[in-house]
Structure formats: C-alpha cells, structure tokens
Amino acid sequence: MSTPHTHKSNRAPVGAVQCENTSLNLLKANDFVAKTIRDRMAAQSTLVINITSSAGSGKTTLMQATAARLKDTLSMAVLVGDLETERDAIRIREAGVPSLQIVTGGICHLEAQMVLQAMDHITLEGVDLLFIENVGNLVCPAAFDLGEDYRVTLIATTEGDDKPKKYPRMFLTSEVMLISKADLLPYVPFSVEAVVQDAREVNPDIHAITVSSTSGVGIDEWCEWLLERVREKKGSDESNDSVVFLSKQLGSM
Amino acid sequence: MHEVSLVNSIFRSIELEFPKQDVERVRGIFMRVGLLSNVEPVLMQSAFAAVIETESAFRQATLHVEVLPILVHCAECDKTSLVENYKFVCACGKPSNNIVQGTELLIHKVEFALDDD
C-alpha cells in the first residue's frame, strides 16, 4: 500500500491511492460559534431561548403575548429569522420589545454565525431574556445549536397531533413543547394527550404546556416557566429580588 | 438548499484540514451521517454534483455517504440498543434519550490520488 501520509505534510506520497482517516465534524464551526454566544450570554446572565416550529404555528404571536405579559417585569429582546421581509420584527417591536430581523435570504434555518452577527446590532446589555425566533421549519433548525439555554418547540393544534414522530430530532432536542392555538381545540381533530404521548416516545423528558396566545390560556404557566429559568440563570443570590418579587406578583394574578 | 450548504461545509472543512496541494488530489470523500442528522444521501449526491461544477478543485472527487442508525444507551440495564421507528425505548422497556450514535455529521475518511512526480 502507500506510505502513511500525515496532515499538513509536504511529503510526496508513493503508490496508487492513499487514505486519510479523519473525523471532521461538519457542524464544528457552528458549534464553536454557538459556544461563543453561550459564554457571552452566561457572562451577563441572559437567558437565551431558541423558539422553533413549522411556519405559521404562532411563534411571533406567542412573542407578542409574552411581551405583553413580561415586558414590565423583565428586560427582553427578540431576534427573529425569516427568509425575507422584516414583518415579524416590526410586529414584535409594536408589542414594545426591542427586536431585530435576521433575513436569511433563502437559508432554511438560523446558524450561530448569523445570531452572533445580529448581536452586534441590538443592545443586549441588561437583557434578562433573549428569544431567538427561528425560521419556521421543523427539519434543519434542529441540527444547529445557537448557543441557547433551552429550545422550545411550538406545535399548533391545527397541525395534527402526529408531528413529533415525523420530526423526531426537533422534539428530541427540545426541552419544552408548547401546544399552541389551544383556543381552536373544539374545532380541530387534535388530541393534546396523543401529541404529548407521541413526543414523550421521542423525548421522555419533554415538558408540555398548552397555550393560546389569543385567548391567554396557559400564558401564565408559560411565563412562570420562563421566570423560573431567568431566576435560575441569575443564580439564587439576593440581589435579584426584583425578578423574584415580580414573579410572585404575576403568580397571584 | 440545506444539502448545498452541507456540501460547501464539506469542502471548507477539507480545505482547512489538508494542505492546498493535497486538496486538489482528493478523489474520495467518505461521510458518516446519523439518521437524526436529517441528511438524505440521494439529495447529498445531487447537491454534490451541482456544487463541484463551480468548485474545480473537487471535480474529480466522489462522495460516499454511509447512514448510521440511532443507538441509545440505557442507564438502567447498561445496554446499548437500536432505536426503531423513533421510539426511544431500551429493550428493557425503560425510555432513554441518551443517544450514543445517530446525530453524526462526519467526514471519516478522505482518499487522495497519488501524483507521478
């Protein structure tokens, strides 16, 4: 066979065909940038949530409902990815929260590099909660770590309760599944029980919350979950009384 | 769309890993992709064919894609089992999402032609 050939060597090989056994991870570059984001956000105790779902399952409407409920309690910001237009960022800004659109120009998912670049164009100092609203797609975004603390996947009651098994990686890598558009449950053949069971066969640990951004059902539970995570991120030190206090206030509403 | 960007990642990864003169001698690229990576071998081949049109350095290269099944390790019985139909349950009946194989997106071997001089 051939002379073993080492990386970066200029040695001319002899023989017919030589092989180089290697282990090049194609997502290495993305994972490296994701770590940069994670470290930067950890240093300033900002909780980062990556929101994923199919197109049209209510990610932006959830952002508006969440903003309405939490914007006076904590400081939040939203980065939102779409193939084209600034429509979603405008909607979120109208809800009173700083938001920046990431236009992917045809790419079907957000990559960590896009998020890192966008971070230079929005003020994140003092932000307690940063949402990254991904491109509407249950396939490709699953593979790209964006440096988030938690991945939350929405599944609308209009989509069908058999989705988790069809898009297993997304549900496998999500900590939370939000069943959205719960106000439509009386009109659609969708079983919350079936979707939760389907998701748990893929990911036994997934936490499920049923919400409706329009009627407000479940929004309290969702915001409580967020506040709990923000509190954890900030640590249990006494200096964060404001968040603890406001969360109690919210709980008693 | 996604496959084209993956093929570009393959080329950029190889360029970073090997010296320039070796890159032009690449004849075979062997990938291992886990079932959970959502990579479809047929689409990868079409994307590869399309991208090498503009990437002359790789024009003589062939892509080989091997799909790896999903394996989970069960903490209860300390066994590794195959995940079928995306049911993340160990043979002992306990649910497990401790994936030990199935998310890979790796180039595990690169084959080079040998020049005469």
Image (tube, rainbow, N blue to C red):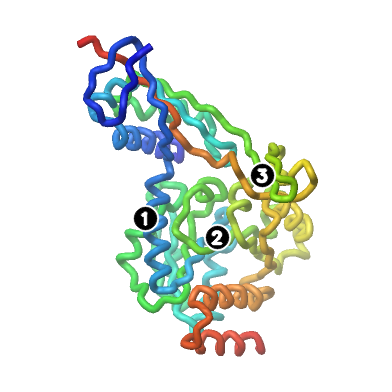
Residue closest to the far left: B117
Vertical position of residue A250 compared to residue B13: above or below: below
Local SS, label 2: strand
Chain identifier of the residue bearing label 2 in the image: A
* Residue B81 point in image, percent of width and height: 70, 38
| Mark 2 surroundings: few (<14), some (14-19) or many (≥20) residues within 10 A | many
Depicted B90 relative to depicted A33: above or below: above
The residue identified by callout 1 is A114
**Position of B91 compared to A233: left or right?**
right
Q: Which residue is mark 2?
A: A151
Asked if both marks, 3 and 1, belong to the same chain, the answer given is no
Task: Indicate the amino acid at tag 1.
Answer: Met
The chain ID associated with circle 3 is B
Between residue A1 and residue A123, name the one nearer to us.
Answer: A1
A5 to A34, vertically: above or below: above
A64 left or right of A161 in image: left
Amino acid found under the numbered disc labelled 3: His
Residue A190 horizontal/vertical position (percent) = 76, 57
Crowding around mark 3 (Cα neighbors within 10 Å: few <14, some 14 to 19, many 20+) is many
Crowd rating for badge 1 (residues with CA inside 10 Å; few <14, some 14–19, many 20+): some
Q: Which residue carries the number 3 mark?
A: B73
Label 1 marks a residue whose chain is A
The residue at 51%/64% (across/down) is A149
Report the front residue among B28 and A11.
Answer: A11
Is disc 1 placed on a helix, strand or loop? Answer: helix
Question: Label 2 is placed on what type of residue?
Answer: Arg
- Residue A244 is situated, as x and y percent measured from the top left of the image, at 56, 86
Residue A230 seen in render: yes
**Which residue is painted at 44% across and 73% down in the image?**
A45
Contact? badges 3 and 2 (CB < 8 Å): no
